[in-house]
Image (spheres, coloured by chain):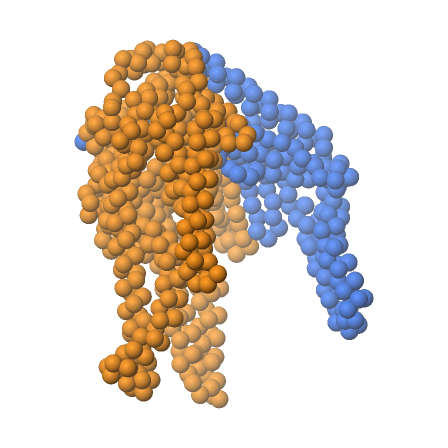
Chain colours: A blue, B orange
Amino acid sequence: MNELPDDRFSNAQLPSASIPDYREVHFEAVDARFGRYAIVSTLVLFAPYLIAAIVARWFFAIPLFAGLLAIAGLLGLTLGVAGYRWVAGGFRGWALREHDLIARSGVLWRNITALPIVRIQHLETSHGPLERMFGLARLKLYTAGGVSADLVVIGLAREPAEQLREHLVEQIRVRESALSNADAENV
Amino acid sequence: MSEHGECWTALPIAAVGALYLNGIQRLVRENLVVLFGAGTGFAVSDALGWYEFALIGMLVLAVGLLVAVIYHRRFRYLVADDHIRVRQGLFEQTQVKVRFDRVQNVSFSQPVYLKPFGLTRLGLETPGAAQTEVRLPGIRTSEAERIHDLVAACQDNGAAAVEDNGLREPEADLQASAAPAAVFSTRIGDLFGYGLTSNQVWILLALFGAPVSNWIERRSSGWVSELTANGLPDEVWLEHAPWLLGLAAGGLIVALALALMLLSGLLAVIRFYDYRLTRDGGRLKSRSGWFDVREKTLNQSRLHSMELVQTAIGRAIGHWYALGHQAGAGHGEQGLATDRRFLIPGIHSSQLETVAAALVGHSWQEPDWQPIDRRFRNRLWARIVSPIFVSGLVLWMLPQWSAQWPAAVLMLASLLLGAVIHQNYKRWGFAFDGTRVQIRRGLIGQRISSFEIARCQQFRLTCSPYQRRHGLASLVLRLPHGDATIPYLQRELADDLANQLLFQVEQAQTQTL
């Protein structure tokens, strides 16, 4: 049976006090226009269903009370979702540290996601028509092995989003260049 | 560039047969359900006879041969000292270049039909690619060995290593290659046990269960009539003994399940026959197979996570299997043929620590598991078990309710569910020794995930309102092959683990630079 290379393994205790605490970060709020964007995008999302309900009431002779109840229910749901997303915007935030990016989201179920910059494989900013209308953008970050974006920071103003993207790209470029130099020195 | 890498090479002419058989094999494997359905359609259709069936079959086979010939004519590869290029495609030609230092897994395979021609299939996998990046479907075994050596030399990171490997004599046959001492090897009984415990049984049951049960249903009334005609049982008597029919049906189901388990065990023996795990420096090599000899090489430095799995049946017979995950192995990829995970089957409980140690690269033993918070179980009891039990109790107490057995069933089911939830809670456990995170979960069986925290890609902390009230959080650690979750941790501990993760990932990178 082969000998196990035990000498490769180390398991030294780390001084926990010296480890930076991610809870000490100050989260940047999303852009002020995000609330309006959340409401409008929800209305746009639900509009086809509302229109379909109104048309159905008109053409299929659905009793007035039942038709109005269905439309009011749908409208209530739309406003409820829009309101929730507007409130959720206030709970969203992001923080950039020297070595990682942290984002938080959620009103009832709260999430905090942290992605070390060294793990980013590639990143992109994107903005749909509505986001463009409100001058917003989203930053998508991808790591190895993932099939979709591992972290999406939404509700950023266009300019800070681009600055953030350029900063991260520069960090990755510096890291890769340093890695190449280290490899060359090793060879 | 070496003398080998100056020109594009075609596959040997004998590889056409390999391509043809490969194609048919893949067609059958990927469309098993469709083919089974088509076969049933032919069997029951009056419009199509055996002549038409044979004609269509021959047409499909002829088209397959034509495709194999064209594919062979257009397939070219070029091997240089530090990379390989492959040009292929039926209608659209694509060219792939893979640097050997990026290769994380080299796989050899020698099906029984390639052996007489001295050919081997070779696959090179890189991190980040969803599928095997380069696949040479039939090259000379000596050429496959040479490519393997070049990959090894590049990964050993030295020109001298390339020279040394160039002197190595190519081996004529995979079977004949010199075998270093095995870290782990299996006996036929262990492999049969693996077949019994693996999920192959359920795949087979899904494939054959429905058609067989339909067939039994169609035939059962005929059998009863035949038996009655023979004067064995009386139909009236049978009507008064429904349990006998139930017993017969149950017996048939058990017999079918046993037959499938037997089949699964035999398939495992054929697939992993003479399994040997060997170590070659920083690489692990597995080699197995009866008709199709497969060899897989795993660069240990690229292994980011290990899983040890014991199914419910595996627990009864003391059997495990291990999985090594590498970057880019795909999320939840389950197909047996396209599986890129490094699988070690048929591990007896007494050998578990040896195999785990071989995978992680240092001694390993099962840690003292820390439990998750008991509110994980209490919450499920309150949300799922209690409503069912209370519903049963209310039904039981209703004065006008004459039949009380449905209420009793509801209450018993809720108690059983409660026991299942408790068992699941007891199985959850985690351990962190400052470097390595280990998570155990399961119900009757268990699955242990073990990985260095510095291998994680990111973390996510989630808190439901209930968890916030009790100072709890669930920690989701993302690894290149998927997520590992520790639910219902004390918030303080979850935060500490998260901080450790960020610190170790970032510190490891800083040290590299």
Residue B362 in sight from this viewpoint: no
Query: In percent of the image, x 75 and y 54: which residue is there?
Result: A47
Query: In percent of the image, x 60 and y 45: which residue is there?
Result: A105
Left or right: residue B422 versus residue B130 is: left
Examine the rendered structure and indicate whether residue B478 appears above or below residue B170.
below
Left or right: residue B28 versus residue B194 is: right
Location of residue B453 in the rendering, given as x and y in whole percent from the top left corner: 41, 35
Location of residue A120 in the rendering, given as x and y in whole percent from the top left corner: 53, 30
Query: In percent of the image, x 59 and y 42: which residue is there?
Result: A104
Residue B41: quadrant of the picture: bottom left
Examine the rendered structure and indicate whether residue B456 appears above or below residue B484.
above
Examine the rendered structure and indicate whether residue B318 appears above or below residue A28.
below
Query: In percent of the image, x 48 and y 48: which residue is there?
Result: B474
Location of residue B307 in the rendering, given as x and y in whole percent from the top left corner: 35, 42
Q: Please state which of residues A154 and B112 is positioned toward the viewer in this rendering.
A: B112
Q: Please state which of residues B19 and B275 is positioned toward the viewer in this rendering.
A: B19
Q: Please state which of residues B401 and A28 is positioned toward the viewer in this rendering.
A: B401
Location of residue B450 in the rendering, given as x and y in whole percent from the top left corner: 36, 40
